[in-house]
Structures are given as C-alpha cells and as structure tokens.
Image (cartoon, helix red, strand yellow):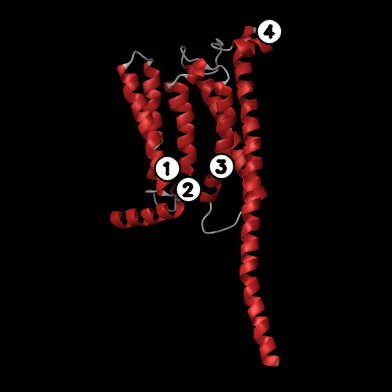
Amino acid sequence: MLKRKLINEYKIFRSEATWAEFALWWLMRGLLIYALVTVGKQDRNPVIALQLKSEIVLSFIIPLMHLLPKRIFLSRIHYRTQNSVMIMLFLMSFMGQYMDYLNKYEWYDTYMHVVSSLVFVFICYRLTLSLQRGDKKISPMVGAICAFGLSFLFAIGWEIFEFICDFLFLDSNTQNWSFVHSDQLQALFPNIDPRRYPLLDTMVDLIADTIGSVIGGFLLYVYLLIKKRKKHFAAKNQSYPCKKSENNKTSVKNA
C-alpha cells in the first residue's frame, strides 16, 4: 500500500516539477541547516536558532502533505508551490534572520512584506486549485481574485499573530513598539506620539502587504489570461488542419 502510494507520488512529482527544481529545494534546505549549525557555534540570540529549526521543518511540509489521503485538499497542492515556499524561507530566514538583514537594513522588513504578499498570491492560487477535485477550469479573473483574497488574509493573520505575541510575552517586540532601527521611518513622522508606534508599524506592514497583493494579483491575472489564450489558439490550430483535410476529401469526391 505504502509502496504503491510512493510510486504514484513519484509519478505526480515528475509531471509537476523538474530535477532542477528538486535540486533548488535541497540547496535552500542546505543553507538553512548550515545557518542553524553556525548559529549554534556563535553567541547569537537563541530565538534565531528556534526560528531556523521551525523553518527547516516547514521546508518539508509540502512534500509530506502529499502523503496524506487525496480526499484532503492539502495533499493535492501542486509540487511547484515548493519553489515559492523555498524562496520565501531563503529571503526571510537565511537573509533576514541569519545574515541579519532585518537589522542591517531598515526597510528590509517592508520590502519583505511586499515581496512575500506578491509570492503568496501565486501560492494561494495553487491552494485554490487544490480545493477542487477533477480538472475544472477557473477563469483568470476568478483565480486572481481568490488568490489575492487569500494572500491578504494571510497578511492580516500575520499582523494578528504579532499583536498576540506582544500581548502575551513581555519581551516580545514583533510590532516594533520600541522602534529599533527605525530612524528613517520616524523621520517621516517626526511629531507622532510614541504610543502610536505599534499602530504605525502595523499599518506600514499592511500597506506593504496590500501593494504586494495587488501587484501579485495583476501579474497572476495577466499570466493566466495569456496561458488561456495560448491554449485556445493551440486548440484552434489543431482543429483547423482536420477541417481542411475534410474539405479536401469532399472536393475530391465531388470531382
């Protein structure tokens, strides 16, 4: 039973992803494992090691989900979704946390909110497709709107998570209420009441998420529209020679 399941999943994997993509996934995992080992040898914040451990586990989530029964929609998510997940983990975990870009570059977190929301649109489109059974088609507009909505839902959920962390843990600073490494942002709002810092941080993040989701939704719509038209023209070109040959046969008979 398990052997048959693994063979079937291997066939699905080969039809949905390439060996180059598979190598990319393991390269990213290797970088995360290297970062975890290096952090363990250095005098770094233990929270970083905990985050890296959880993110290494997360990098295996999608392949493991495919071992679930097919009646569970998460087992039907496209293997190529792993590309987006690994890119996000590389930018957030390896570059942001291990390389410390979040502290070295003030606007890195804001850029990450834009990029992550954009990438999540494409992840959420794959998630939308996995929710349905069979080969049903989704129009480009519906697909883009669903993906945009889910992406923005995840963005809002993340801000709620930050609020809960700061509420439950006294040492938590996910909303950056102390405004560490935020000199440029403070310069844009010189007269703001310090008590509004967490709100300012949250709203800047949500604005960045909105920009990323809108751009991602537009790009996804254009991509799906082009893909749909290519299929339409390909189908039309395939049927045209058949019709032409039938007409030739009819003309020969009439002669």
Residue found 43% across the figure and 44% down from its top: 21
Q: CA distance from mark 4 to mark 2?
A: 47 Å
Q: Position of residue 81 (x, y in %)?
A: 48, 43
> Where 57 sits versus 73, above or below?
above
**Callout 2 touching callout 1 (CB < 8 Å):** yes
Q: Amino acid at mark 2?
A: Ile
Left or right for 252, reference 166: right
Q: Amino acid at mark 4?
A: Pro
**Residue beneath disc 2:** 77
Reading the chain from its start, which is encountered first: label 1 or label 3? 1
**Residue beneath disc 3:** 122
Q: Amino acid at mark 1?
A: Ile
> Where 253 sits versus 108, above or below?
below
Q: CA distance from mark 3 to mark 4?
A: 38 Å
**Residue beneath disc 1:** 62
Residue found 55% across the figure and 22% down from its top: 108
SS assignment at label 1: helix
SS assignment at label 2: loop
Reading the chain from its start, which is encountered first: label 1 or label 4? 1
**Residue beneath disc 4:** 190
